Image: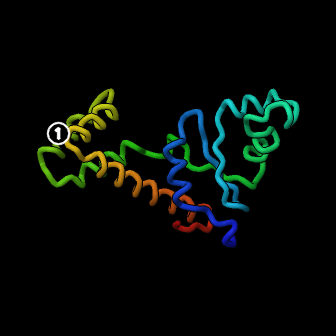
Amino acid sequence: MDEKNTVLISEIVASFDKISGDRMAYVNIHTGELKLLTTDDIYRSETIKSVDDDKETLSKEIIEAILYSDDYLPLPAEDDINDYEIMIDFIYTIKEDEVRNTLFKKIRGRGTFRRFKAMIRHYQIEEDWITFKKEAFHTLAIDWCELNGLDYKED
């Protein structure tokens, strides 16, 4: 890949926060460009007859290229990004025993992420969490690029 075809790690990291059950991200292996695709996009592409039918969304041709050509690779899906494991790793980095132990207790059972977010706000360590999660996503992005043989760069 030349410079034009290089994937920007920051764009992959940013896309990880946008990936959900109904939204996937894909990278064009020839241009390095990222595209987000929703289940609604796919549904609309199946009902659009031509590009002119719907100017607000990705064209049918682009969606089909993303889904069916070898030009695009899907980024890890929501299920492949283990936010819970990242959260556990973050808690282990907390030096204060009381805070660390409280967080471990709060992440059991239902509502784990909601309670975790409330507690990191309470202990005023939300910025530390954001930085840690971004670094974890950064490592995941580099690992994904290397696994798929894509050139990447930091910006």
Give the residue drawn at x 67%, y 30%. 40
Between 88 and 43, the one lying in front of the other is 43
The kind of secondary structure element at disc 1 is: helix
Relative vertical location of residue 46 with respect to residue 152 in this rendering, above or below: above
Question: Where's residue 8, x and y in %?
Answer: 57, 62
Would residue 6 appear left or right of 21 to someone viewing this image? Answer: right
Between 104 and 133, the one lying in front of the other is 133
Question: Where's residue 52, x and y in %?
Answer: 86, 35
Give the residue drawn at x 28%, y 37%. 116
Question: Where's residue 128, x and y in %?
Answer: 29, 52
- Tell me the residue that label 1 is attached to: 102
Give the residue drawn at x 80%, y 32%. 54
| Residue type at the position of mark 1 | Thr
Determine which quarter of the picture holds residue 87.
top left
Would residue 54 appear left or right of 151 to someone viewing this image? Answer: right
Relative vertical location of residue 154 with respect to residue 41 in this rendering, above or below: below
Relative vertical location of residue 34 with respect to residue 3 in this rendering, above or below: above
Give the residue drawn at x 87%, y 30%. 49
Mark 1 nearby-residue class (10 Å; few <14, some 14–19, many ≥20) = few
Would residue 106 appear left or right of 138 to someone viewing this image? Answer: left
Most extreme residue toward the front is: 55
Can you say which quadrant of the picture contains the N terminus?
bottom right
Colouring method of the image: rainbow
Question: Where's residue 51, x and y in %?
Answer: 85, 37
